[in-house]
């Protein structure tokens, strides 16, 4: 049976809504869905005029989602603590048994520091409408939340959202932007000072790893469409996660990251240690030699090993079993390659996503070790607010969740694009080499945006 065209799918979703009645004991959160014929998901999202707009594509899954509007918005601004967030999360999970109801969002890198307005310390959205692709199957769905509005109001909002949907327009490849200026925070001079502080024998003895990072601000005179940019980035690194959040027309955060924080299926958890970096070779032979050098390098092995150990240590009290690969393998991206170790755990009964984020995030691939002193150093010395860069972004539902680490990311605002890159500073790190590592991590996005 062939799936209906978009216009027919919209019609049948509208019919489902108009004839919908609430059963006496039904959940207060309901999802209605219809199948639809193939639609280019990012192009569909880019054509919509409703906010928030959210895009999510998992790394090892054949699943892709575009979401617009919202029927529940959890925004945790500056004055919220973890306990409050955890209570909200538990309450919300209890409102439906439907596995397909998902909350998409993110948690800032540092919940104890200021974050970006609109994004907050954490923000999760139950979208009004989603277009989901699972392999070759496409579904258009609408969520209804009867906890805040009357039945009639909620149905009317949903009908309005469906009636306002726009058709997808083909996405043109992004134009190269004319750069009006570039500034790095910290700049190269300050970076050298910071790396030297961290690698000082006295400091590194107590704090063996701090992941320092940099914000590169590009000044531009033109508008850059985040979704066009993300679609192009996705083409360069298809084996990464790709996602984006645009809560209002003014600003968007997009990421094409190779790093998984975790993926949970009931009580089975998959995570990884991703740290240690080199460039790609210009031919197969050189590429292989570089990968071997990376595997043999003490500084990079140490960077990765510290992440593996910390993840295993924090998972142990939450799990019946934790297994981590003893030897790293090499994960290849378009311009760089990383050391990678897979980690798997069987969680104890009752361990929830909020506990997992609290325990795992930020890992020493983006924060440091021990966590608190490293976070303090970053907070006090880095000189800019990371916001959602290196934060945890993804989705959760009642039994499953997946979160990526928002590195290789960009924040797009009027007149500028902020790019982010970090590097794990450990014993043996040299400021110049780590600075080059930051540059290498930006090569892909810079080559899309500018004439390199
Ligand atoms: C913090 C970043 O990368 C982390 C992930 C992989 C490799 C890393 C490294 O080799 O330093 C970093 O720990 C970033 O890209 O912003
Ligand atoms: Mg590194």
Image (tube, rainbow, N blue to C red):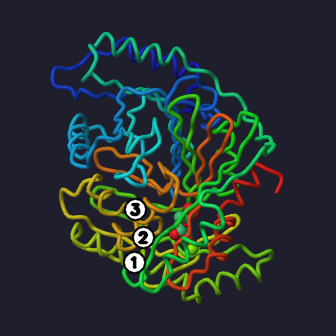
Q: Circle 1 is placed at which residue position? A: 207
Q: Quadrant of the N terminus?
A: top right
Q: In this rendering, which labeled residue sits more in front, label 3 or label 1? A: 1
> Which residue is found at the position 42% from the left and 31% from the top?
127
Image quarter for ligand 1 equals bottom right
Number of the front mark, 2 or 1: 1
Q: Are marks 2 and 3 in contact (CB under 8 Å)?
A: no
- Residue underneath mark 2: 368
The residue beneath circle 3 is 362
Query: What whole-number distance in Å separates the C-alpha atoms at marks 2 and 1?
Result: 8 Å
Earlier sequence position, callout 2 versus callout 3 = 3
Rendered view: 9 above or below 195:
above
Label 3, secondary structure: give it: loop
Mark 2 and mark 1 lie on one chain; the one further toward the N terminus is: 1
Mark 2 vs mark 3: in front:
2
Disc 2 crowd, CA 10 A, few/some/many (<14, 14-19, 20+):
many
Q: Residue at x 71, y 33 (%)?
A: 223
């Amino acid at each position: 049976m062939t799936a209906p065209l978009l216009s027919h799918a919209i019609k049948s979703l509208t019919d489902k809504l108009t004839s919908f009645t609430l059963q006496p004991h039904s959940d207060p959160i309901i999802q209605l869905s219809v199948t639809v014929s193939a639609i280019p998901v990012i192009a569909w999202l880019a054509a919509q005029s409703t906010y928030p707009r959210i895009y999510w594509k998992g790394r090892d899954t054949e699943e892709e989602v575009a979401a617009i509007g919202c029927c529940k918005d959890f925004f945790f601004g500056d004055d919220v603590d973890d306990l409050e967030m955890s209570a909200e999360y538990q309450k919300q999970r209890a409102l439906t048994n439907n596995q397909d109801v998902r909350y998409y969002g993110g948690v800032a890198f540092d919940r104890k520091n200021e974050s970006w307005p609109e994004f907050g310390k954490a923000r999760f959205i139950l979208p009004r409408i989603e277009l989901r692709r699972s392999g070759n199957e496409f579904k258009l769905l609408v969520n209804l939340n009867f906890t805040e509005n009357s039945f009639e109001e909620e149905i009317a909002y949903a009908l309005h959202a469906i009636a306002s949907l726009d058709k997808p327009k083909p996405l043109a490849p992004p134009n190269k932007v004319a750069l009006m200026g570039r500034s790095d925070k910290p700049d190269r001079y300050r970076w050298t000072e910071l790396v030297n502080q961290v690698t000082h024998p006295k400091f590194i003895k107590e704090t063996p790893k701090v992941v320092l990072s940099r914000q590169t601000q590009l000044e531009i005179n033109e508008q850059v469409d985040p979704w066009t940019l993300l679609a192009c980035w996705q083409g360069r690194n298809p084996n990464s996660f790709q996602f984006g959040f645009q809560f209002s027309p003014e600003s968007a955060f997009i990421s094409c990251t190779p790093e998984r924080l975790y993926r949970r299926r009931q009580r089975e958890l998959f995570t990884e240690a991703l740290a240690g970096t080199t460039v790609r070779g210009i031919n197969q032979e050189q590429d292989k030699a570089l990968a071997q050098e990376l595997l043999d390098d003490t500084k990079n092995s140490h960077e990765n090993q510290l992440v593996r150990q910390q993840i295993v240590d924090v998972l142990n009290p939450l799990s019946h079993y934790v297994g981590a690969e003893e030897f790293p393998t090499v994960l290849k991206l378009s311009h760089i390659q990383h050391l990678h170790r897979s980690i798997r755990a069987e969680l104890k009964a009752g361990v929830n996503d909020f506990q997992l984020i609290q325990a795992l995030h930020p890992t020493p691939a983006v924060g440091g070790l021990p966590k608190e002193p490293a976070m303090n150093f970053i907070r006090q010395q880095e000189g800019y607010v990371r916001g959602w860069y290196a934060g945890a972004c993804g989705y959760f539902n009642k039994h499953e969740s997946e979160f990526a680490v928002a590195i290789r990311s960009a924040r797009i605002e009027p007149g500028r694009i902020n790019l982010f890159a970090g590097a794990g500073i450990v014993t043996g790190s040299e400021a110049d080499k780590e600075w080059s590592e930051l540059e290498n991590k930006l090569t892909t996005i810079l080559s899309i945006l500018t004439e390199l």
